[in-house]
Image: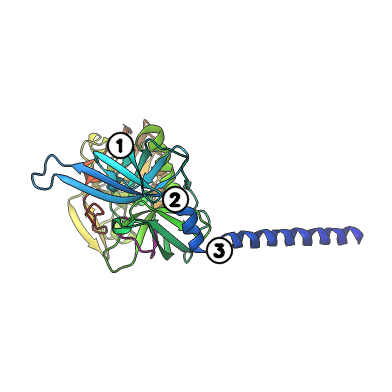
């Protein structure tokens, strides 16, 4: 009986300690936004960039304004690629009025992430590391800090509405779902941080919807950090290139046209490995409900022996691909099945990637002068 009593007492003490720790953690995540803003504001910079367009006879000089976040003690700043793309001069305003020249370390138009390095930094800088969105839930409060309309530093409060929004801006958008919140994002906010009640950076603001919607999208902090680390290390984001774009065939289309389950090849990027091994996109557009399909291309049944049955299968294979890897693809077309093999090179920057930096159906460009 004494042993049981001691065990019960010990279990109760452990439970109380755990509950106390949980309670303490909960309190640390209820900081007033005024305190979070005060602690974070010195890490957020305003960015001005100038780009000279040699092909435009009228508006040759383009101005951009945006925001950025100092992420380490080496004066690296994360911002949006569309803020600094092809800029000849970049200046960052640190603190309230200190202007520092910045050099572009690298940018990635697909993720809309760029990294700058501040030059001639006179003293130590405050910074906020990326990678703090673990444990986020829909309904949590956040603030977006930036320089809207080129004015002074400000904050807007909102709640998280969705953590896995896929916006079809590129053929690779589905690999990095975005965070949706109603913290107001305006021209000039792009590249600034989205911060939780714990004072952690949970995202980098990237896309705002048309005026009046009150919604904005941010790149998750962990993803932004992974892109930034690779840009700092390699000068770019390195991706394998296959050139295949398509959708999983839904059951109604399989039954209607007597097609096998698999990935429908809708388009093939010019010059890609997929084109070189003879894969073709479709030519017959078809709308089913809210979704468009292009029929007529091959259907990929498996990759390296892994059968494609769901979108999750495709996503897992895509995440595991590496530059230099050899792929064996089983494809179906018009009743016949064949296998083709290719080796994946590094994906170059394509014309469609750059188009995103100038036009988007969701974002009104921050490059417009306020």
Mark 2 closeness class: few <14, some 14–19, many ≥20 residues within 10 Å: some
First in sequence: mark 1 vs mark 3:
3
* Of labels 1 and 2, the one closer to you: 2
Residue 68 appears in the figure = yes
At mark 2, the secondary structure is helix
**Spatial distance from mark 1 to mark 3, Cα to Cα?**
43 Å
Q: Looking at the picture, does residue 157 appear above or below residue 87?
A: below
Q: Is residue 301 left or right of residue 333?
A: right
First in sequence: mark 1 vs mark 2:
2
Give residue 289's position: percent from left, percent from top: 27, 66
The dot on residue 347 is: 1
The dot on residue 30 is: 3
Quarter of the image for residue 341 reads: top left
Magenta segment boundaries in residue numbering: 179-188
Residue drawn at 43 percent across, 61 percent down: 143
Mark 3 closeness class: few <14, some 14–19, many ≥20 residues within 10 Å: some
Q: Looking at the picture, does residue 55 appear above or below residue 46?
A: above
The answer to whether the residue labelled 3 contacts the one labelled 2, judged by CB atoms less than 8 Å apart, is: no
Residue pointed to by mark 2? 42
Q: Residue furthest bottom?
A: 212
């Amino acid at each position: 009986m004494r042993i049981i009593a001691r065990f019960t007492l010990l279990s109760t003490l452990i439970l109380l300690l755990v509950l106390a720790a949980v309670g303490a953690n909960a309190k640390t995540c209820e900081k007033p936004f005024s305190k979070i803003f005060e602690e974070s504001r010195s890490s957020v910079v305003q960015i001005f960039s100038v780009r000279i367009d040699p092909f435009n006879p009228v508006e040759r000089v383009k101005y951009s304004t945006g925001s950025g976040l100092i992420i380490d003690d080496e004066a690296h700043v994360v911002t949006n690629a569309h803020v600094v793309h092809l800029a000849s001069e970049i200046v960052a305003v640190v603190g309230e009025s200190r202007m520092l020249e910045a050099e572009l370390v690298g940018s990635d138009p697909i993720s809309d992430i760029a990294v700058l390095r501040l030059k001639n930094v006179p003293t130590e800088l405050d910074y906020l590391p990326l990678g703090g969105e673990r444990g986020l839930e829909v309904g949590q409060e956040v603030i977006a800090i930036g320089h809207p309309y080129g004015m002074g530093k400000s904050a807007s409060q909102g709640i998280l509405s969705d953590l896995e929004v896929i916006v079809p801006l590129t053929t690779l958008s589905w690999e990095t779902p975005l965070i949706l919140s109603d913290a107001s994002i305006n021209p000039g906010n792009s590249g600034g941080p989205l911060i939780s009640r714990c004072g952690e950076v949970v995202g980098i603001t990237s896309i705002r919807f048309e005026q009046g919607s009150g919604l904005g999208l941010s790149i998750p902090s962990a993803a932004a950090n992974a892109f930034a680390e690779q840009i700092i290390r390699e000068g770019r984001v390195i991706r394998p290139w296959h050139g295949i774009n398509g959708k999983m065939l839904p059951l109604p289309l399989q039954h209607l046209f007597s097609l096998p389950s698999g990935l429908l090849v809708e388009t093939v990027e010019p010059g890609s490995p997929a084109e070189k091994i003879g894969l073709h996109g479709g030519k017959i557009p078809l709308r089913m409900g809210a979704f468009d399909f292009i029929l007529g291309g091959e259907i990929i049944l498996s990759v390296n022996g892994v059968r494609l049955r769901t979108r999750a299968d495709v996503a897992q294979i895509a995440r595991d691909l590496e530059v230099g890897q050899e792929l064996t693809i089983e494809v179906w077309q018009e009743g016949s099945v064949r296998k083709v093999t290719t080796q994946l090179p590094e994906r170059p920057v394509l014309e469609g990637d750059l188009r995103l930096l100038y036009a988007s159906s969701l974002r009104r460009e921050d490059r417009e002068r306020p």
